[in-house]
Image (cartoon, rainbow, N blue to C red):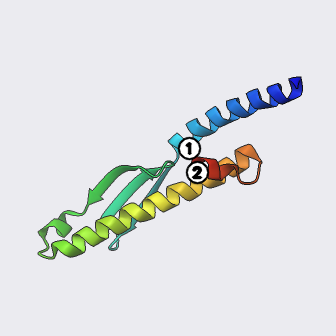
Amino acid sequence: MSDMMKNLGNLKQQMGQLKETVEKITAEADAGGGMVKAVANGEGRLISLKLDPKLMNEKDREMAEDLIVTAINKAADKARKQAEKEMKSLMGIPGMDKLFR
């Protein structure tokens, strides 16, 4: 029982370290040949969005909206994949990465 409690304490500490690591992960993606750039963190949250000034002069707003959505989704996907990779390497336990989804 003592070993189990010790392991649980170690797991809790590792989970805390893992959360800090995931929060620091960032991924950038672009769409439209770099006209729209998005950066997301390891939790998949959008951190920043940059639009090329030329894009805002275009009359086709629908295209701009589509590019923004694409860039955001690509950045979030990349950040999630990096976070999953980091979780797997830190935890060394198969399936642990699914706990954070």
Few, some or many residues within 10 Å of mark 1 (<14, 14–19, 20+): many
Nearer to me, 71 or 97:
97
- How far is the residue under mark 1 from the one under mark 2? 6 Å
Q: Are marks 1 and 2 in contact (CB under 8 Å)?
A: yes
Q: Tell me the SS state at disc 1.
A: helix
Q: Is residue 61 left or right of residue 87?
A: left
Residue at figure coordinates x 28%, y 71% from the top left: 66
x, y percent for residue 59: 11, 75
The numbered mark at residue 83 is 2
Few, some or many residues within 10 Å of mark 2 (<14, 14–19, 20+): many
Identify the amino acid type marked 2. Ala
Residue at figure coordinates x 63%, y 48% from the top left: 99
Task: Name the residue carrying label 1.
Answer: 22
Q: Quadrant of residue 55?
A: bottom left
Question: Can see residue 35?
Answer: no
x, y percent for residue 49: 31, 55
Residue at figure coordinates x 24%, y 68% from the top left: 65
Q: Is residue 57 left or right of residue 24?
A: left
Q: Is residue 76 above or below residue 17?
A: below
Identify the amino acid type marked 1. Val
Q: Residue furthest front?
A: 1
Nearer to me, 51 or 76:
76
x, y percent for residue 86: 65, 49
Nearer to me, 15 or 83:
15
